[in-house]
Amino acid sequence: MLPSTEYHSPRIVFAGTPEFAAVHLEGLLSSGYLPCAVYTQPDRPAGRGRRLQASPVKQLAQGHNLPVFQPHTLNTPETVRQIAGFHPDIMIVVAYGVILKQAVLDIPRLGCINVHASLLPRWRGAAPIQRAIAAGDRETGVTIIKMTEALDAGDILASSSWPITEFSTSATLHDELARLGSSLLPPTIDKLVRGTITAHPQPKQGVTYAHKLNKQEAHIDWSLPAVHLHRLVRAFNPWPVATTILRGKPFRILEAIPLKTADAVNGLHTTDTPGTLVAITNDGLDIATGDGFLRLQQVQLAGRKPLFARELVNGLSLKIGEQLG
């Protein structure tokens, strides 16, 4: 959707860092919106060589010859003055990585707006995609809000829902929500500039917080139900990846499915100790859990490439009764 010629195209400052934000910047450019400035996080060391690497937003912006700025924060007096110097009508913030102070929020004529990867007020915070999958939510989406100093608590301008299926991982859902948000953003800007959109306060009920992920919580507790573990495997793919221990070494689980009944593993009983390898099939490795079984389909040994679980059987001489933990 191109901006209407009936009004002056807004002056936009864009702030974002990862691929999720870059997809939204690409959507703006494709819709005819050309930011007058782009802010992104400083280059970070990445890869085995730990060489400095530009963010996806920086790479995209430079490819379109947009001015790029990389302060450590937007909240210093110097950066506040710099942003104000662009006289923005709107500032769009997508996964920038720093909470903005009121001095920044007050600069744009029409305010700062944010695209968040959940249906607010559910899953405010840093990891909404992963937390939604881990909690067993059947639905998520994107929400565009007018920003306030409070975390993801601003009035809602627009939202769009998206299903979470039993096959959704954080990787696949990330890409789906990025596309969803990037298609919702241009028409929302259009309505905001025209004054034809009304912001609505977030409901006071249903507020939850998506706390930042850490590696420790990705360690599998086999006493949990198989259905719960299946959600965690999907939520922690691609990072930090659900992990257990096999023969004293880390054993990463990339894909798995829950088996609800004992009949699914040749009549074995749920009295098996959680974490026990109870069956080896062409479809994977079946592990006893606190309730049911988890069939491991794609796994990764430390320092190795991902492979189908059944490919491990001969290489490691796996045997029924081995314990994971």
Image (tube, helix red, strand yellow):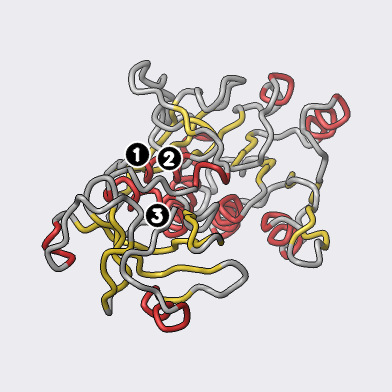
Q: Is residue 54 visible?
A: yes
Q: Is residue 76 above or below residue 13?
A: above
x and y percentages locating residue 145 in the rendered image: 49, 31
Residue that numbered label 2 is attached to: 131
Horizontal relation, residue 79 to residue 278: left or right: right
Residue that numbered label 3 is attached to: 234
- Residue at image position (42%, 57%) is 324
Horizontal relation, residue 79 to residue 15: left or right: right
For this orientation, the residue located farthest to the top is 204
Mark 2, residues whose alpha carbon is within 10 Å: few (<14), some, or many (≥20)? many
Callout 2: helix, strand or loop? Answer: helix
Q: Is residue 97 above or below residue 156?
A: below
Residue that numbered label 1 is attached to: 135
For this orientation, the residue located farthest to the bottom is 314
The answer to which of marks 1 and 3 sits earlier in the sequence is: 1
The answer to which of marks 3 and 2 sits earlier in the sequence is: 2
CA separation, marks 3 and 2? 11 Å
Horizontal relation, residue 296 to residue 243: left or right: left
**C-beta proximity under 8 Å, tags 1 and 2:** yes
Quadrant of residue 308 within the rendered picture: bottom left
